[in-house]
Image (tube, grey):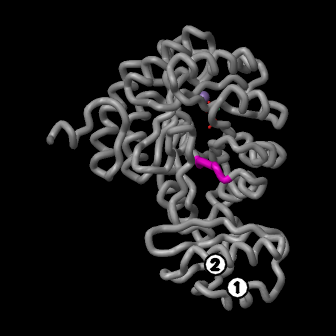
Amino acid sequence: MIVIMSSHADEEQIQGVMARLESKGLKGHRSGGEERTVIGVIGTRFEPQLGEQLEMLPGVERVTPVSKPYKLASREFKPFDSIVRVGDLEIGGREIVVMAGPCSVESREQVLETAEAVKAAGATVLRGGAFKPRSSPYSFQGMGEEGLRILAEVRELTGLKVVSEVMEPDQVGPVAEHCDILQIGTRSMQNFPLLREVGKTDKPVLLKRGMAATIEEWLMAAEYIMASGNFNVILCERGIRTFETAVRNTLDLSAVPVVKRLSHLPVIVDPSHGTGKWYLVKPMAMAAIAAGADGLLVEVHPSPDTAASDGPQSLNLPNFAELMQSLRAVGSAVGRTVPGGISVGAAVA
Ligand code: PEP
Ligand code: MN
Protein backbone atom coordinates (compact mmCIF):
# COMPACT_ATOMS: atom_id res chain seq x y z
CA MET A 1 0.00 0.00 0.00
CA ILE A 2 1.02 3.62 -0.35
CA VAL A 3 0.46 6.58 1.94
CA ILE A 4 -0.11 9.84 0.09
CA MET A 5 0.70 12.83 2.30
CA SER A 6 -1.22 16.05 1.83
CA SER A 7 0.60 18.81 -0.06
CA HIS A 8 1.11 20.81 3.16
CA ALA A 9 2.27 17.89 5.35
CA ASP A 10 5.39 18.85 7.31
CA GLU A 11 8.48 16.80 8.15
CA GLU A 12 7.21 15.93 11.62
CA GLN A 13 4.01 14.45 10.17
CA ILE A 14 6.00 12.43 7.63
CA GLN A 15 8.21 11.11 10.43
CA GLY A 16 5.06 10.26 12.39
CA VAL A 17 3.93 7.94 9.58
CA MET A 18 7.40 6.39 9.27
CA ALA A 19 7.48 5.72 13.02
CA ARG A 20 4.01 4.17 12.99
CA LEU A 21 5.07 1.82 10.18
CA GLU A 22 8.18 0.84 12.09
CA SER A 23 6.14 0.07 15.21
CA LYS A 24 4.12 -2.38 13.09
CA GLY A 25 7.26 -4.13 11.82
CA LEU A 26 6.98 -2.45 8.40
CA LYS A 27 9.26 -0.11 6.46
CA GLY A 28 8.41 3.09 4.66
CA HIS A 29 10.03 3.96 1.33
CA ARG A 30 9.80 7.69 0.92
CA SER A 31 9.68 9.48 -2.42
CA GLY A 32 8.72 12.99 -3.23
CA GLY A 33 8.18 15.48 -5.99
CA GLU A 34 7.80 19.23 -5.64
CA GLU A 35 4.15 18.88 -4.66
CA ARG A 36 3.92 16.10 -2.08
CA THR A 37 5.55 13.13 -0.39
CA VAL A 38 4.43 9.56 -1.02
CA ILE A 39 5.41 6.70 1.30
CA GLY A 40 5.43 3.15 -0.07
CA VAL A 41 4.87 0.55 2.64
CA ILE A 42 7.18 -2.46 2.53
CA GLY A 43 6.46 -5.61 4.50
CA THR A 44 4.79 -8.97 4.37
CA ARG A 45 2.18 -8.68 7.13
CA PHE A 46 -0.39 -5.91 6.99
CA GLU A 47 -3.02 -5.79 9.73
CA PRO A 48 -6.50 -5.42 8.23
CA GLN A 49 -7.14 -2.01 9.85
CA LEU A 50 -3.71 -0.56 9.02
CA GLY A 51 -4.91 1.55 6.09
CA GLU A 52 -7.71 3.14 8.12
CA GLN A 53 -5.37 3.80 11.05
CA LEU A 54 -2.77 5.48 8.85
CA GLU A 55 -5.44 7.64 7.24
CA MET A 56 -6.20 9.10 10.70
CA LEU A 57 -2.64 10.34 11.22
CA PRO A 58 -2.04 14.08 10.78
CA GLY A 59 -0.83 15.13 7.33
CA VAL A 60 -2.07 11.96 5.59
CA GLU A 61 -4.35 12.60 2.64
CA ARG A 62 -5.19 9.01 1.74
CA VAL A 63 -3.93 5.43 1.73
CA THR A 64 -4.36 3.26 -1.36
CA PRO A 65 -3.53 -0.39 -2.08
CA VAL A 66 -1.15 -1.20 -4.96
CA SER A 67 -3.23 -3.06 -7.52
CA LYS A 68 -0.41 -4.59 -9.59
CA PRO A 69 1.22 -7.98 -8.81
CA TYR A 70 4.58 -6.20 -8.71
CA LYS A 71 4.55 -3.64 -5.92
CA LEU A 72 7.97 -2.06 -5.33
CA ALA A 73 8.61 -1.78 -9.08
CA SER A 74 5.24 -0.15 -9.79
CA ARG A 75 4.61 3.49 -10.45
CA GLU A 76 1.72 3.31 -8.00
CA PHE A 77 4.23 2.57 -5.23
CA LYS A 78 6.56 5.33 -6.37
CA PRO A 79 5.01 7.90 -8.72
CA PHE A 80 8.32 9.66 -9.41
CA ASP A 81 11.04 8.46 -11.80
CA SER A 82 13.88 6.59 -10.11
CA ILE A 83 17.46 7.57 -10.82
CA VAL A 84 19.99 4.77 -10.36
CA ARG A 85 23.36 6.17 -9.31
CA VAL A 86 26.63 4.51 -10.29
CA GLY A 87 29.22 6.66 -8.52
CA ASP A 88 28.81 10.09 -10.10
CA LEU A 89 26.80 8.72 -13.03
CA GLU A 90 23.01 8.95 -13.04
CA ILE A 91 20.86 6.54 -15.03
CA GLY A 92 17.31 7.78 -15.53
CA GLY A 93 18.11 11.51 -15.44
CA ARG A 94 18.24 13.99 -18.33
CA GLU A 95 21.51 12.63 -19.65
CA ILE A 96 21.41 9.58 -21.93
CA VAL A 97 23.79 6.88 -20.67
CA VAL A 98 25.50 4.84 -23.37
CA MET A 99 27.09 1.53 -22.34
CA ALA A 100 29.35 0.23 -25.09
CA GLY A 101 31.99 -2.41 -25.66
CA PRO A 102 32.57 -5.90 -26.96
CA CYS A 103 30.17 -8.79 -26.51
CA SER A 104 33.00 -10.83 -24.94
CA VAL A 105 36.22 -9.82 -23.27
CA GLU A 106 38.89 -11.38 -25.53
CA SER A 107 42.15 -9.69 -24.47
CA ARG A 108 43.48 -6.67 -22.57
CA GLU A 109 44.38 -4.92 -25.85
CA GLN A 110 40.94 -5.48 -27.38
CA VAL A 111 39.15 -4.12 -24.29
CA LEU A 112 41.48 -1.15 -23.82
CA GLU A 113 41.34 -0.09 -27.47
CA THR A 114 37.54 -0.32 -27.48
CA ALA A 115 37.20 1.47 -24.12
CA GLU A 116 39.33 4.42 -25.20
CA ALA A 117 37.42 4.80 -28.45
CA VAL A 118 33.94 4.56 -26.92
CA LYS A 119 34.92 6.97 -24.16
CA ALA A 120 36.18 9.50 -26.68
CA ALA A 121 32.86 9.20 -28.51
CA GLY A 122 30.80 9.88 -25.34
CA ALA A 123 30.04 6.48 -23.78
CA THR A 124 30.23 6.50 -19.98
CA VAL A 125 29.99 2.75 -19.26
CA LEU A 126 32.12 -0.04 -20.72
CA ARG A 127 30.39 -3.36 -21.37
CA GLY A 128 32.10 -6.73 -21.83
CA GLY A 129 31.14 -10.30 -20.98
CA ALA A 130 33.56 -12.43 -18.96
CA PHE A 131 31.04 -15.20 -18.28
CA LYS A 132 29.17 -15.85 -21.52
CA PRO A 133 25.80 -17.60 -21.80
CA ARG A 134 26.16 -19.28 -25.21
CA SER A 135 23.43 -21.26 -26.94
CA SER A 136 25.99 -23.93 -27.85
CA PRO A 137 28.30 -25.58 -25.28
CA TYR A 138 30.97 -25.67 -28.04
CA SER A 139 31.03 -21.87 -28.51
CA PHE A 140 33.50 -19.58 -26.70
CA GLN A 141 32.36 -19.44 -23.06
CA GLY A 142 34.25 -16.31 -22.01
CA MET A 143 37.51 -15.62 -20.17
CA GLY A 144 35.95 -15.91 -16.71
CA GLU A 145 37.79 -14.31 -13.79
CA GLU A 146 40.73 -13.26 -15.99
CA GLY A 147 38.22 -11.30 -18.07
CA LEU A 148 36.95 -9.59 -14.91
CA ARG A 149 40.50 -8.56 -14.02
CA ILE A 150 40.95 -7.03 -17.49
CA LEU A 151 37.70 -5.08 -17.10
CA ALA A 152 38.76 -3.80 -13.66
CA GLU A 153 42.16 -2.69 -14.97
CA VAL A 154 40.61 -0.87 -17.94
CA ARG A 155 38.13 0.77 -15.58
CA GLU A 156 41.09 2.14 -13.60
CA LEU A 157 42.88 3.32 -16.74
CA THR A 158 39.90 5.03 -18.39
CA GLY A 159 37.57 6.05 -15.53
CA LEU A 160 34.67 4.35 -17.33
CA LYS A 161 32.15 2.43 -15.22
CA VAL A 162 31.90 -1.27 -16.09
CA VAL A 163 28.93 -3.60 -16.62
CA SER A 164 29.33 -7.38 -16.96
CA GLU A 165 27.03 -10.38 -16.91
CA VAL A 166 26.58 -12.67 -13.95
CA MET A 167 25.13 -16.10 -14.75
CA GLU A 168 25.22 -17.95 -11.44
CA PRO A 169 24.75 -16.99 -7.78
CA ASP A 170 28.40 -17.95 -7.09
CA GLN A 171 29.61 -15.41 -9.65
CA VAL A 172 27.89 -12.46 -7.96
CA GLY A 173 30.75 -11.89 -5.50
CA PRO A 174 33.59 -11.79 -8.07
CA VAL A 175 31.62 -9.75 -10.63
CA ALA A 176 30.53 -7.26 -7.94
CA GLU A 177 34.15 -6.92 -6.82
CA HIS A 178 35.46 -6.04 -10.30
CA CYS A 179 32.48 -4.24 -11.91
CA ASP A 180 30.06 -1.40 -11.18
CA ILE A 181 26.86 -2.88 -12.64
CA LEU A 182 25.71 -6.53 -12.59
CA GLN A 183 24.03 -7.65 -15.82
CA ILE A 184 21.33 -10.32 -15.75
CA GLY A 185 21.04 -11.75 -19.26
CA THR A 186 17.87 -12.61 -21.14
CA ARG A 187 18.34 -16.34 -20.43
CA SER A 188 18.54 -15.69 -16.69
CA MET A 189 15.63 -13.30 -16.25
CA GLN A 190 13.64 -15.90 -14.34
CA ASN A 191 16.57 -17.48 -12.51
CA PHE A 192 15.06 -16.65 -9.13
CA PRO A 193 18.01 -17.73 -6.93
CA LEU A 194 20.24 -15.46 -9.05
CA LEU A 195 17.78 -12.56 -8.81
CA ARG A 196 17.65 -12.97 -5.02
CA GLU A 197 21.46 -13.06 -4.83
CA VAL A 198 21.97 -9.81 -6.78
CA GLY A 199 19.15 -8.38 -4.67
CA LYS A 200 21.27 -8.91 -1.56
CA THR A 201 23.99 -6.60 -2.91
CA ASP A 202 23.76 -2.84 -3.27
CA LYS A 203 25.24 -2.88 -6.80
CA PRO A 204 23.07 -1.54 -9.63
CA VAL A 205 21.55 -4.41 -11.63
CA LEU A 206 20.91 -4.26 -15.38
CA LEU A 207 17.96 -6.62 -15.86
CA LYS A 208 17.46 -7.73 -19.45
CA ARG A 209 14.02 -8.74 -20.60
CA GLY A 210 13.63 -12.48 -21.12
CA MET A 211 13.40 -13.25 -24.84
CA ALA A 212 9.94 -14.77 -24.30
CA ALA A 213 8.85 -12.72 -21.32
CA THR A 214 5.84 -10.44 -21.11
CA ILE A 215 6.37 -6.99 -19.67
CA GLU A 216 4.57 -8.10 -16.51
CA GLU A 217 6.91 -11.09 -16.07
CA TRP A 218 9.88 -8.75 -16.59
CA LEU A 219 8.62 -6.38 -13.89
CA MET A 220 8.01 -9.36 -11.59
CA ALA A 221 11.68 -10.30 -12.07
CA ALA A 222 12.62 -6.73 -11.06
CA GLU A 223 10.36 -7.18 -8.03
CA TYR A 224 12.41 -10.22 -6.92
CA ILE A 225 15.55 -8.08 -6.85
CA MET A 226 13.83 -5.20 -5.08
CA ALA A 227 12.07 -7.43 -2.56
CA SER A 228 15.52 -8.76 -1.61
CA GLY A 229 16.53 -5.20 -0.71
CA ASN A 230 18.19 -3.79 -3.84
CA PHE A 231 16.22 -0.93 -5.43
CA ASN A 232 18.96 -0.11 -7.97
CA VAL A 233 17.39 -1.85 -10.94
CA ILE A 234 17.80 -0.72 -14.56
CA LEU A 235 15.56 -2.48 -17.09
CA CYS A 236 16.91 -3.35 -20.55
CA GLU A 237 14.75 -4.16 -23.57
CA ARG A 238 16.80 -6.45 -25.85
CA GLY A 239 14.27 -7.88 -28.26
CA ILE A 240 11.83 -10.76 -28.04
CA ARG A 241 11.16 -13.93 -30.04
CA THR A 242 8.52 -13.56 -32.72
CA PHE A 243 7.74 -15.30 -36.04
CA GLU A 244 10.00 -12.78 -37.84
CA THR A 245 13.26 -14.18 -39.22
CA ALA A 246 14.69 -11.10 -40.96
CA VAL A 247 16.14 -9.97 -37.63
CA ARG A 248 17.69 -11.94 -34.74
CA ASN A 249 15.01 -10.68 -32.32
CA THR A 250 12.11 -8.27 -32.62
CA LEU A 251 13.10 -5.14 -30.72
CA ASP A 252 9.98 -4.15 -28.80
CA LEU A 253 10.35 -0.38 -28.58
CA SER A 254 6.76 -0.03 -27.42
CA ALA A 255 8.00 -1.66 -24.20
CA VAL A 256 9.80 1.61 -23.36
CA PRO A 257 6.73 3.85 -23.00
CA VAL A 258 4.71 0.93 -21.59
CA VAL A 259 7.26 0.33 -18.83
CA LYS A 260 7.58 4.07 -18.17
CA ARG A 261 3.84 4.10 -17.50
CA LEU A 262 3.83 1.02 -15.28
CA SER A 263 7.10 1.50 -13.42
CA HIS A 264 9.37 4.20 -12.02
CA LEU A 265 12.54 2.29 -12.97
CA PRO A 266 14.92 3.54 -15.68
CA VAL A 267 14.79 1.69 -19.02
CA ILE A 268 17.56 1.28 -21.55
CA VAL A 269 17.55 -0.45 -24.95
CA ASP A 270 20.00 -2.92 -26.53
CA PRO A 271 19.68 -2.48 -30.31
CA SER A 272 22.56 -4.93 -30.92
CA HIS A 273 20.89 -8.09 -29.59
CA GLY A 274 17.57 -6.50 -30.54
CA THR A 275 18.38 -6.70 -34.26
CA GLY A 276 21.43 -8.96 -34.68
CA LYS A 277 22.75 -6.80 -37.54
CA TRP A 278 25.23 -3.93 -37.20
CA TYR A 279 23.55 -1.82 -39.88
CA LEU A 280 20.24 -1.88 -37.96
CA VAL A 281 21.82 -0.68 -34.72
CA LYS A 282 21.91 3.03 -35.56
CA PRO A 283 18.28 3.45 -36.71
CA MET A 284 16.95 1.45 -33.76
CA ALA A 285 19.19 3.26 -31.27
CA MET A 286 17.89 6.60 -32.52
CA ALA A 287 14.31 5.32 -32.35
CA ALA A 288 14.91 4.07 -28.78
CA ILE A 289 15.98 7.52 -27.60
CA ALA A 290 13.02 9.10 -29.40
CA ALA A 291 10.74 6.59 -27.62
CA GLY A 292 12.01 7.74 -24.21
CA ALA A 293 14.78 5.27 -23.35
CA ASP A 294 17.23 6.46 -20.66
CA GLY A 295 20.20 4.87 -22.35
CA LEU A 296 21.59 2.23 -24.67
CA LEU A 297 23.68 -0.93 -24.51
CA VAL A 298 25.68 -1.25 -27.73
CA GLU A 299 28.16 -3.91 -28.84
CA VAL A 300 31.34 -2.40 -30.28
CA HIS A 301 34.47 -4.23 -31.47
CA PRO A 302 37.70 -2.93 -33.10
CA SER A 303 37.39 -5.63 -35.81
CA PRO A 304 33.90 -7.16 -35.75
CA ASP A 305 34.84 -9.74 -38.40
CA THR A 306 37.23 -11.40 -35.93
CA ALA A 307 35.01 -11.14 -32.80
CA ALA A 308 34.72 -14.27 -30.64
CA SER A 309 30.98 -13.65 -30.30
CA ASP A 310 28.29 -11.47 -31.88
CA GLY A 311 30.54 -9.92 -34.55
CA PRO A 312 27.68 -9.47 -37.09
CA GLN A 313 25.82 -7.14 -34.71
CA SER A 314 28.88 -5.22 -33.44
CA LEU A 315 29.70 -1.71 -34.60
CA ASN A 316 33.28 -0.91 -35.49
CA LEU A 317 34.89 2.11 -33.81
CA PRO A 318 34.16 4.76 -36.50
CA ASN A 319 30.56 3.59 -36.84
CA PHE A 320 30.11 3.89 -33.09
CA ALA A 321 31.44 7.47 -33.12
CA GLU A 322 29.02 8.29 -35.93
CA LEU A 323 26.13 6.75 -33.98
CA MET A 324 26.89 8.97 -30.97
CA GLN A 325 26.83 12.03 -33.20
CA SER A 326 23.39 11.06 -34.53
CA LEU A 327 22.09 10.45 -31.00
CA ARG A 328 22.91 14.02 -30.02
CA ALA A 329 20.45 15.36 -32.58
CA VAL A 330 17.68 12.97 -31.46
CA GLY A 331 18.45 13.66 -27.80
CA SER A 332 18.11 17.40 -28.18
CA ALA A 333 14.78 16.90 -29.99
CA VAL A 334 13.36 15.07 -26.94
CA GLY A 335 14.97 17.18 -24.21
CA ARG A 336 17.85 14.80 -23.40
CA THR A 337 21.59 15.31 -23.53
CA VAL A 338 24.27 12.94 -24.78
CA PRO A 339 27.74 13.38 -23.28
CA GLY A 340 30.80 14.26 -25.37
CA GLY A 341 30.96 16.09 -28.68
CA ILE A 342 29.27 19.43 -29.25
CA SER A 343 25.57 19.42 -28.49
CA VAL A 344 23.29 20.77 -31.21
CA GLY A 345 21.99 23.43 -28.79
CA ALA A 346 25.51 24.63 -28.00
CA ALA A 347 26.43 24.75 -31.68
CA VAL A 348 23.41 26.92 -32.45
CA ALA A 349 24.11 29.26 -29.50
C1 PEP B 1 25.09 -9.86 -24.04
O1 PEP B 1 24.79 -8.74 -23.59
O2 PEP B 1 26.16 -10.12 -24.60
C2 PEP B 1 24.06 -10.94 -23.97
C3 PEP B 1 24.38 -12.22 -23.91
O3 PEP B 1 22.82 -10.44 -24.00
P1 PEP B 1 21.38 -11.18 -23.94
O4 PEP B 1 21.29 -11.76 -22.57
O5 PEP B 1 20.42 -10.05 -24.18
O6 PEP B 1 21.34 -12.20 -25.05
MN1 MN C 1 26.43 -10.36 -27.18
* Mark 2 Cα shell of 10 Å, populated few (<14), some (14-19), many (≥20): many
Badge 1 vs badge 2, beta-carbon distance below 8 Å: yes
Residue 136 lies left or right of residue 97; in this view the side is right
Residue occupying image coordinates x 43% and y 18%: 117
Residue 116 spot, x, y in % from top left: 46, 17
Query: Which image quarter is the C terminus in?
Result: top left
| Image quarter of residue 69 | bottom right
Q: Amino acid at mark 2?
A: Val
Residue 258 spot, x, y in % from top left: 51, 61
Residue 304 spot, x, y in % from top left: 50, 16
Residue occupying image coordinates x 42% and y 41%: 284
Residue occupying image coordinates x 43% and y 24%: 119
Chain part drawn in magenta: 231-235
Residue under label 2, please give it.
3
Q: Residue furthest top?
A: 109
- What secondary structure is the stretch in magenta mostly built from? strand
Which of the two residues, 244 or 80, is positioned nearer the viewer here?
80
Query: Which image quarter is the N terminus in?
Result: bottom right
Q: Is residue 318 magenta?
A: no
Residue under label 1, please give it.
54
Ligand 2 image position (quadrant) = top right
Which mark is first along the chain, 2 or 1? 2
* Mark 1 Cα shell of 10 Å, populated few (<14), some (14-19), many (≥20): some
Q: Is residue 199 above or below residue 67?
A: above
Residue occupying image coordinates x 56% and y 16%: 111
Residue 281 lies left or right of residue 131; in this view the side is left
Q: Amino acid at mark 1?
A: Leu
How far is disc 1 from disc 2 in space, using C-alphas? Answer: 8 Å
Residue 173 lies left or right of residue 284; in this view the side is right
Residue 134 lies left or right of residue 300; in this view the side is right
Which of the two residues, 107 or 89, is positioned nearer the viewer here?
89
